[in-house]
Image (tube, rainbow, N blue to C red):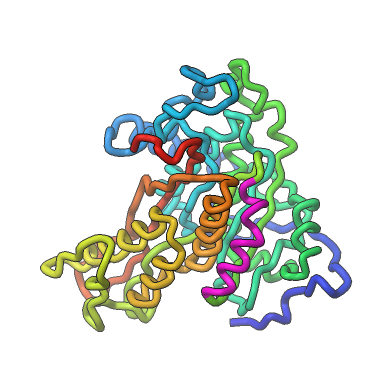
Amino acid sequence: MGSMGSFSSSSRKEPESYTRRAHHAGSWYTSSASELDSMLTTFLEDAHAAASSDLSTPATCQNMTQPPSSSDNGNGTNEFLSWSEMMPRSVVVPHAGFSYSGPTAAHAYLALREAVIMGGVSRIVVLHPSHHIRLDGCAVSGASTLENPLRNLPVDEELRQELLATGHFQTMDRHVDEQEHSGEMQYPFIAKVLLDASSSSSYSNGNLAHKNVDSITVLPIMVGGISVSQEAFYGRLLAPILAKDGTFTVISSDFCHWGSRFGYSPPRDRDYRNLGGGRVADLAMEEIYEYIEQLDRMGMDHIQMQNPGAFAEYLKRSKNTICGRHPIAVWLNATKVNKENGTENVEIKFVQYAQSSQVKSTRDSSVSYASAIARKTENTNLPN
């Protein structure tokens, strides 16, 4: 793992901006624009069909061609809206190669597409972890443009400067930025959503959102291996920014990394299920992959509860290898602050879960993927 020397302090002379190349195109996903577009189209269409047909899954795209308007109270809010009709504000998304996690990620990106259609997006903040560099804090991308095969994405310079001015953010250099895959794996999906919105007349329908798609900016923020107190600090710092109208947040994370190559093989090394509270553990599970899912869903429950303290305790006790745990925790702390001060209240629901393979032997390994959507509620007494 590298050192923090690959970052620039906000107190130093700001490095020259650069175009962030699509470093993982051709390996983690295809570098062919046509093939990538076809792949993402299939993922999104399949997710749409699954969400629409499965009554137990929120139909996140049931109103894809126009924003909900029935029973509007005249000021854009409606205390009787169901969860699936509320404005999407954030998503938790996996970041493995698209052949593995793309179908799961698509369930979350339906919500971004919906928010763009509804005119609710002017900037997208991507919170992602660091897999290769040791970072005690957070760092913004130093790029001016995020390149990818479908559509280049402009970086939000105004927000970057606002964060650097706090003195609490560093700037990634080009090498660090391009080596980190957890941010990059979000950019093709973002580009796909914006490309479709800007080119398809089906998105107009009296809504002007598609006319402003070209002006939507993105700011990647790398969240390092920070402490619980630092997670709370950065959550407070980012809370007013993430709550701003027009800001959509993408939190990049895979879930359990199981197997000897990840150094995590419960319950063979230790049974972490009986943690107390939350989901009740079934200690009679027969298959390892079922155990892994149960362990993941305990963490997902804490995320849905929006309790960063409980999530931190779960991670401490379970040791679950959720690689985006720090970005998730920063986001949870931000949602907690916004709820407590009355700025914004959201409801979080996980809408899809999958594993790269079903582990049945200690010789196997797998990575888990989960997608969640956070929607803005207008009334804390909304029906479930």
Quadrant containing the C terminus in the rendered view = top left
Q: Is residue 26 visible?
A: no
Quadrant where the N terminus is found in the figure: bottom right
Q: Quick one: which residue is furthest to the right in this view? A: 13
Q: Nearer the viewer, residue 379 or 240?
A: 379
Residue 21 x, y percent position in the rendering = 70, 58
Q: In this picture, which residue range is highlighted in magenta?
A: 228-243
Question: Percent x, y for residue 75?
Answer: 60, 24
Q: Is residue 262 above or below residue 322?
A: below
* Magenta part, dominant SS: helix
Horizontal and vertical percent position of residue 260: 33, 80
Instruction: Residue 144: tell me if it is visible.
Output: yes
367 drawn magenta? no
At 39% from the left edge and 47% from the top edge, which residue is drawn? 349
Q: Is residue 233 magenta?
A: yes
Q: Nearer the viewer, residue 201 or 113?
A: 113
Left/right of residue 199 with respect to residue 69 in the rendered view: right
Nearest the eye: 129 or 337: 337
User: Residue 212 lies in what quarter of the image?
Assistant: top right
Q: Position of residue 330 (x, y in %)?
A: 55, 63
With 312 as the anchor, is 179 left or right in this view?
A: right
Q: Is residue 17 above or below residue 343?
A: below
Name the residue located 21 percent from the left edge and 68 percent from the top edge: 288
Examine the rendered structure and indicate whether residue 110 appears above or below residue 305: above
- Direction from residue 276 to residue 194 in the image, left or right: right
Residue at figure coordinates x 57%, y 75% from the top left: 226
Rendered residue at 46%/64% (across/down): 308
Q: How many marks?
A: 0
Asked which quadrant contains residue 76, the reply is: top right
